[in-house]
């Protein structure tokens, strides 16, 4: 009697490389980082966009959440695609997990 | 390249040369969707700096080369752009775009001043007598160190060493180059302490004479006052028998004053040919500036029997020295003339020649009596002078070595 061939388990490419449920682009995207110094300088990496900008508050879309910086005389020294530098008298930094 | 160019008030905070050369524009964003405009700028890789809100919108700055890209994005977001300030080399030079001569002149002036700072404008001598100054000045000219020349520190060090070796009278000599001035300083060397000569010598009579007074410094006296000595007689001996130490050999030194009788005969021609300037004198000038020699004449005509003298001196304008050295070549034409002298003049010249020879042979001689005889032989005056004088006849000579 011919031996029955044992059937192996089937893995998709996503399962093989453990990309479970997340797209490749999402995984390869750089993660947003926020550096805060006590001298009133904030350095933000990989911010998506500015939502609102006034002298007293700045709202930034970081992708996974929204940051709201409240303070006085907030000036954006450098604004690039992957880097933002803000200085001023910062009073509060708030994190909103629901955009809007 | 950094673009930290403006503060929020528009002041320059960090202005490296790269930023200045690239240029920057500060502008206002009026109306529309300002935030979205900046987001799109970032997406388009336009580096925006110093963004701060204003009552009518935003104010920001951007590098000059990126400013043209903003218009399209501004139109898309219904914003108006208004330039506040323009900074950088491009804008600074814009007003000179058709006046390049001004810039060229400024650049030339900077170049000239940078070169002139290394040039010798004037040479000053400190603690030099006029004679010493003239000597050192001529030595400096030989080494091409003069007003208008460019010298390095190494060159000056070499010249300084050479001057020190050439001038034995100076303990040290220093060339200080400060702000275009070359200051020459020196210290005169003190003479070395006198040391008694160790040579074995005798004192002999320089001429015949009658000894009047003897002053012996060293050696054994061989003659006494009142004696008559002939030329070459030993007056003081350097080698003698000591009372206890045996034979003593040393340096004999003495002053022996004696009455001497000398006879001189001099022939003085009554006519002679001499070369004298004929009154025609020409000067030719050459300017020395840096390594350049600029002659100020076309053709030099020199007579065969002409004397040439070269003088160098700094050029001055209204008393102020300029970094240019003038070389003056003085050419004096001369002619030969026959000079006829009278007997009296010829005799006077002959007499002076006799007295010069007498002083040279016996320094400090005092003539007591003289008797002269003048004869004319063809074209020559013969002066015979018999002199009775008081002089130091001591002459130091090496001790004669015995011949084998």
Image (tube, coloured by chain):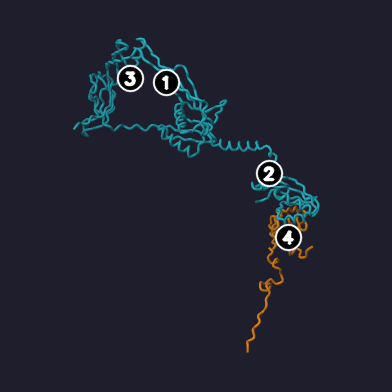
Chain colours: A orange, B cyan
User: Observer-nearest residue: B348 or A69?
Assistant: B348
Alpha-carbon neighbours of circle 2 within 10 Å: few (<14), some, or many (≥20)? some
Image coordinates of residue A23 in percent, x first then y, are 71, 68
Q: Quadrant of the C terminus of chain A?
A: bottom right
Q: Which mark is residue B90?
A: 2
* Label 2, label 1: how far apart the Cα atoms are: 69 Å
Q: Residue furthest left?
A: B404
Chain under numbered label 4: A
- Lower sequence index among marks 3 and 2: 2
* Residues at marks 3 and 2, CA–CA distance in whole angstroms: 87 Å
Find numbered disc 3 in the image and state the secondary structure of the residue it sits on: helix
Question: Helix, strand, or loop for circle 2?
Answer: helix
- On screen, residue B189 versus residue B296, left or right, reads left
Q: Which residue is mark 3?
A: B359
**Which chain does the residue under circle 2 lie in?**
B
At x 22%, y 34%, the residue is: B245
Q: Is residue B140 above or below residue A28?
A: above
Q: Where residue B160 sits: x, y (%)?
A: 45, 36
Tags 4 and 2 on a common chain: no
Q: Which residue is mark 1?
A: B305
């Amino acid at each position: 009697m011919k031996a029955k061939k044992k059937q192996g388990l089937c893995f998709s490419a996503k399962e093989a490389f453990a990309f479970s449920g997340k797209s490749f682009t999402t995984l390869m995207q750089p993660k947003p980082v926020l550096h805060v110094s006590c001298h009133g300088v904030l350095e933000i990496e990989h911010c998506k966009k500015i939502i609102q900008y006034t002298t007293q508050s700045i709202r930034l879309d970081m992708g996974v959440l929204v940051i709201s910086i409240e303070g006085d005389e907030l000036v954006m020294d450098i604004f690039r695609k992957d880097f933002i530098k803000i200085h001023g008298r910062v009073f509060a930094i708030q994190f909103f997990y629901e955009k809007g | 390249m950094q673009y930290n160019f403006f503060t929020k008030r528009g002041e320059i905070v960090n202005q490296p040369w790269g930023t200045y050369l690239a240029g920057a524009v500060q502008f206002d964003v009026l109306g529309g969707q300002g935030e979205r405009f900046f987001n799109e700028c970032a997406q388009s890789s336009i580096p925006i700096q110093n963004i701060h809100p204003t009552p009518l919108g935003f104010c920001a700055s951007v590098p000059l080369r990126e400013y043209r890209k903003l218009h399209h994005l501004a139109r898309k977001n219904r914003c108006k752009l208004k330039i506040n300030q323009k900074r950088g080399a491009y804008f600074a030079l814009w007003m000179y775009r058709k006046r390049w001569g001004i810039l060229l002149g400024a650049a030339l002036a900077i170049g000239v001043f940078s070169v002139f700072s290394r040039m010798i404008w004037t040479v000053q001598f400190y603690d030099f007598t006029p004679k010493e100054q003239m000597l050192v000045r001529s030595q400096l000219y030989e080494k091409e160190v003069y007003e208008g020349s460019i010298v390095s520190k190494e060159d000056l060090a070499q010249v300084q060493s050479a001057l020190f070796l050439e001038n034995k009278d100076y303990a040290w000599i220093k060339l200080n180059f400060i702000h275009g001035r070359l200051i020459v300083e020196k210290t005169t060397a003190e003479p070395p302490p006198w040391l008694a000569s160790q040579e074995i010598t005798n004192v002999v009579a320089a001429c015949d004479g009658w000894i009047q007074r003897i002053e012996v410094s060293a050696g054994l006296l061989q003659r006494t006052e009142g004696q008559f000595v002939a030329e070459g007689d030993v007056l003081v001996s350097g080698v003698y028998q000591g009372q206890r130490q045996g034979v003593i050999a040393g340096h004999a030194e003495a002053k022996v004053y004696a009455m001497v009788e000398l006879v001189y005969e001099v022939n003085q021609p009554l006519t002679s040919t001499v070369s004298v300037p004929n009154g025609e004198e020409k000067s030719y000038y050459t300017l020395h500036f840096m390594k350049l020699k600029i002659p100020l004449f076309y053709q030099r005509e020199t007579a065969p029997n002409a004397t040439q003298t070269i003088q160098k001196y700094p050029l001055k304008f209204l008393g102020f020295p300029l970094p240019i050295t003038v070389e003056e070549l003085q050419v004096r034409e001369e002619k030969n003339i026959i000079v006829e002298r009278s007997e009296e003049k010829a005799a006077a010249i002959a007499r002076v020649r006799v007295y010069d020879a007498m002083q040279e042979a016996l320094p400090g001689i005092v003539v007591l009596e003289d008797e002269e005889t003048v004869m004319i032989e063809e074209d020559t005056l013969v002066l015979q002078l018999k002199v009775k004088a008081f002089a130091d006849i001591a002459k130091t000579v090496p001790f004669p070595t015995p011949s084998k």
